[in-house]
Amino acid sequence: MELKRCRIHQKSWIFLCSILFGFTSGLRPDLKKEDARPLCECGSNVKPLQTRVVGGKNAAPGDFPYATGLLSSGDEYLGRRIFGLTGFRPYCGGTLVTDRHVVTAAHCVRERISGEITLDIGEYDLEDQKQRQDSPKFEIP
């Protein structure tokens, strides 16, 4: 069947497809279609997700002072406009590598102008408003 599909596309492929089809069909003659593993349904996991790292421990304030959150202000969150959303919201992460440089993924800054990005460095608990006010925030000039 694969061979016929190759012939339809282009005559010059007939020889190459014949060789490839003959070669690959003889690799695992013992493998039958019914022996193949069933595919997972889209969006489902084979194993249930675990919410914790095995053998891990909770981080304490100050454990990761180089962790950096890239924040967006106003009604934009995760690159999408959400009306009614106010204040700074994290949309990407980064790592402080010097006192003036943060490494992050390109898609986090690609379509943004520098004044739209605020850095939140060393954040520990996003739910703790007092701690969030105390952590340093820097606007990118």
Image (cartoon, rainbow, N blue to C red):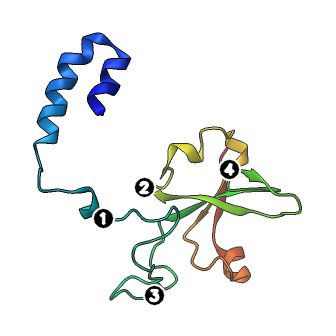
Mark 1 and mark 2 residues within 8 Å of each other at the beta carbon: no
Task: Tell me the kind of residue under disc 3.
Answer: Asn
Q: What is the distance, in whole Å, between disc 1 and disc 2 at their CAs?
A: 44 Å
- Of circles 1 and 4, which is in front? 1
Residue 114 found in image quarter: top right
Q: Earlier in the sequence, mark 1 or mark 2?
A: 1
Between 20 and 2, the residue placed more toward the observer is: 2
> Three-letter amino acid code at disc 1?
Arg
Q: What's the amino acid at mark 4?
A: Ile
First reached walking from the N terminus: tag 4 or tag 2: 2
Residue tagged 4: 117
Task: Indicate the position of residue 82 as horizontal and vertical percent values.
Answer: 82, 57
The residue at which mark 3 appears reads as: 58
State the SS at label 1. Answer: loop
Residue at coordinates 54% horizontally, 70% vertically from top-left? 122
Q: Disc 1 to disc 3, how far (Cα)? A: 37 Å
Tell me whether circle 4 and circle 3 mark residues in contact (CB < 8 Å): no
Residue highlighted by disc 1: 37
**Cα–Cα gap, marks 4 and 2:** 18 Å
As drawn, 23 above or below 9: below
Disc 2 to disc 3, C-alpha distance = 23 Å
Residue 69 percent across, percent down from the top left: 59, 62
Whether residue 126 sits left or right of residue 62 in the image: it is right
Camera-nearest label, 1 or 3: 1
Q: Which quadrant would residue 132 be assigned to in this image?
A: bottom right
Horizontal and vertical percent position of residue 140:
65, 47
Q: Which residue is label 2 attached to?
A: 97
Tell me which amino acid carries mark 2.
Val
Q: How many marks?
A: 4
For discs 4 and 2, the disc positioned in front in the rendered view:
4
Residue in view at x 44 percent, y 80 percent = 48
Tell me whether the residue at label 1 lies in contact with that at label 3, contact meaning CB atoms closer than 8 angstroms: no
